[in-house]
Amino acid sequence: MKETLLDVLLYLFENYFYDDPDAVRDRTTLQAGLIQAGFSPSEISKAFDWLEALDDQRVQFAPTGEIRRDTPIRLYAGPELERLDADCRGFLMFLCHNGIIDAAQHEHVVERAMALDQDEIDLDDLKWVVLMVLFNQPGQEEAFAWMESLMFQDDGEPVH
């Protein structure tokens, strides 16, 4: 099995965080469960580091509560342009302009996406990163629920 950092994160999110957020406190048990699920210790370690950085940055990238639709367009650096395609960047702009995330959360999502161990990040991967960032920030339940409904809708039609 060729697992990636994102595969481990998604497994954790779907099997532990979503149903029992308190379960993530016991790293030893989580690690044993991940190894039993077939993930390599190196990918598990990277996932724990990624999650630790997500938690550590919660204050730095805390939502400001100010949703401005007239904010300037964010310019992406070279490595960001290489890894986040036009669909990803457009989706982030859509989220900002519709008040789902603010500028601070946008930066947090980009930072966490860039921390993934992948050469390219597709739109589905980015959506998971957005969902994990929103899940990790208190007071973002409405935005999380909106994002969750977008990801798990059956018909695949865009939400307007």
Image: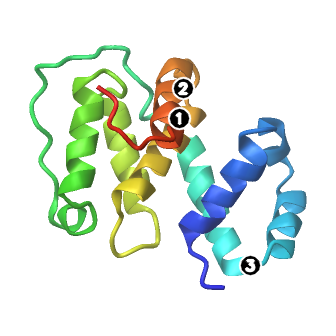
Query: Is label 2 in a helix, a strand or a loop?
Result: helix
Measured as percent of width and height from the top left, residue 84 is found at 26, 60
C-beta proximity under 8 Å, tags 2 and 3: no
Amino acid type, residue under disc 1 in the picture: Glu
Q: CA distance from mark 1 to mark 2?
A: 5 Å
Residue 133 in view (yes/no): yes
C-beta proximity under 8 Å, tags 1 and 2: yes
Does label 2 or label 3 sit earlier along the sequence?
Answer: 3
Q: Residues within 10 Å of mark 2 (few under 14, many from 20)?
A: some
Circle 1 residue: 148
Q: CA distance from mark 2 to mark 3?
A: 32 Å
Measured as percent of width and height from the top left, residue 120 is found at 33, 71
Q: Going 66% across and 85% down the picture, which residue do you hit?
A: 1
Identify the coloring. Answer: rainbow
Amino acid type, residue under disc 2 in the picture: Ala
Q: Residues within 10 Å of mark 3 (few under 14, many from 20)?
A: few
Amino acid type, residue under disc 3 in the picture: Pro
Q: Residues within 10 Å of mark 1 (few under 14, many from 20)?
A: some
Query: Is label 1 in a helix, a strand or a loop?
Result: helix
Q: Going 10% across and 20% down the picture, which residue do you hit?
A: 70
Q: CA distance from mark 3 to mark 1?
A: 29 Å
Measured as percent of width and height from the top left, residue 128 is found at 49, 49
Does label 3 or label 1 sit earlier along the sequence?
Answer: 3
Measured as percent of width and height from the top left, residue 157 is found at 35, 39
Viewport quadrant of the C terminus = top left
Residue 111 vertical position relative to residue 138 in the rendered view, above or below: below
Q: What label sits on residue 41 in the rendered view? A: 3
Residue 27 vertical position relative to residue 91 in the rendered view, above or below: below
Foreground residue among 107 and 132: 132
Report the side of 50 relative to 48 (left or right).
Answer: left
Circle 2 residue: 145
